[in-house]
Amino acid sequence: MTTELKVSHLNKKYRTKKALDDVSFEVKSGQIVGLVGPNGSGKTTLMKAALGLIKVDGEVEIQGEPVTFSKHKQLEKVGQLIEYPAIYPFLTGYDHLKMFADGKENKARIDDLVQDLGMQDYIKNRAKSYSLGMKQKLGIAMALINNPSLVILDEPMNGLDPHAVIEVRQLIQKLAKQGVTFLISSHILSELEKVIDHLIIFNEGKVVRDTTPQELNGSYKIRVVIKTNDDRAACETLNNAGFKMPKTKVSFLLKDDTTLAVVIKFLVEQGFDILDVDKQASDLESSLMKLLYPNESTQGGEA
Ligand SMILES: Nc1ncnc2c1ncn2[C@@H]1O[C@H](COP(=O)(O)OP(=O)(O)OP(=O)(O)O)[C@@H](O)[C@H]1O
């Protein structure tokens, strides 16, 4: 796989605040990479640096060629939506796409995008009548109109209804299959998880993990919740026998499947009925919380 985007030792300071602190990573061609992290951790600053929109220390390369604040040639291959789309209220959505689209043969491309994003009903209306979500879709269409090889999207799902979220997701997946590379920041982790195949986690201006969602989720133990006919009594009995449980809920982190069998056997021997066993694998949201805030887990111990 070739490298589409490479950032090396990026540093950016706003007064005394380090917005980027020695950030390095690579994005391979055709990958859909999620950029996640708490508010103010540096995601937008990184995207702006990758697009040559701000001056930074360090190197940015797109397809092996440098991009800087004053060197923009490579950006012809890049589509982007950072913060809010630049939309003119008295032009129609269609006018915006025509204005942004390179080349003469652009009508078919515009029509395809309008279709893929379900914008047919309003694309010929003036943008002043658009809702937040309609403007956001137009911004995404503008980012994609010139068949970019790399697309950088900052919070693309902002303001989209559930149907629009699915349309955008399917379009991203379709384009990635054709070889388009995506770098996407989002706080909607459950949605991001459905589309990304790689993950860069930021905290306080640093890359704290460069991984896959599967690897991250797999590095945390599974939580088991057992529902019994009397949870409070079951917890007390387990705690008296040396298992570490919360007071009202039979809930613990699983070391291995033997532990689960031991707890169930013990409860049955003590005369409890087992009504349900729920194994909760880590999702992206809970894995990130565990990674970034390791001391905040309060739901009970390990059996
Ligand atoms: N133009 C600016 N002037 C001063 N400080 C800035 C500027 N832009 C960003 N910062 C600071 O840099 C840090 C990183 O901000 P950035 O917008 O990159 O974070 P983010 O991860 O995108 O946050 P969010 O999730 O809230 O969008 C923050 O502390 C922010 O206050």
Image (tube, rainbow, N blue to C red):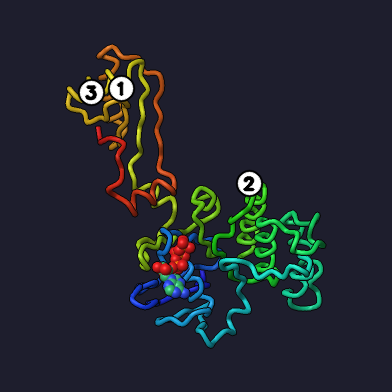
Find out if the beta carbon at label 1 lies less than 8 Å from the nearest ligand 1 atom. Answer: no
Name above or below for residue 166 compared with residue 138: above
Q: Nearer the viewer, mark 3 or mark 2?
A: 2
Q: Quadrant of ligand 1?
A: bottom left
- Which image quadrant for residue 23? bottom left
Residue placed at 64% from the left, 53% from the top? 170
- Which image quadrant for residue 126? bottom right
Q: Earlier in the sequence, mark 1 or mark 3?
A: 3
- Name which residue type carries label 2: Pro
Report the quarter where the C terminus lies: top left
Name above or below for residue 85 compared with residue 289: below
Q: Which mark is residue 238?
A: 3
Residue 43 visible to the viewer: no
- 296 displayed left or right of 6: left
Find out if the beta carbon at label 2 lies less than 8 Å from the nearest ligand 1 atom. Answer: no
| SS at badge 1 | helix
Q: According to the image, label 1 marks what residue?
A: 264
Q: According to the image, label 2 marks what residue?
A: 162
Q: Nearer the viewer, mark 2 or mark 1?
A: 2
- Name which residue type carries label 1: Ile
Q: Position of residue 95 (x, y in %)?
A: 79, 70
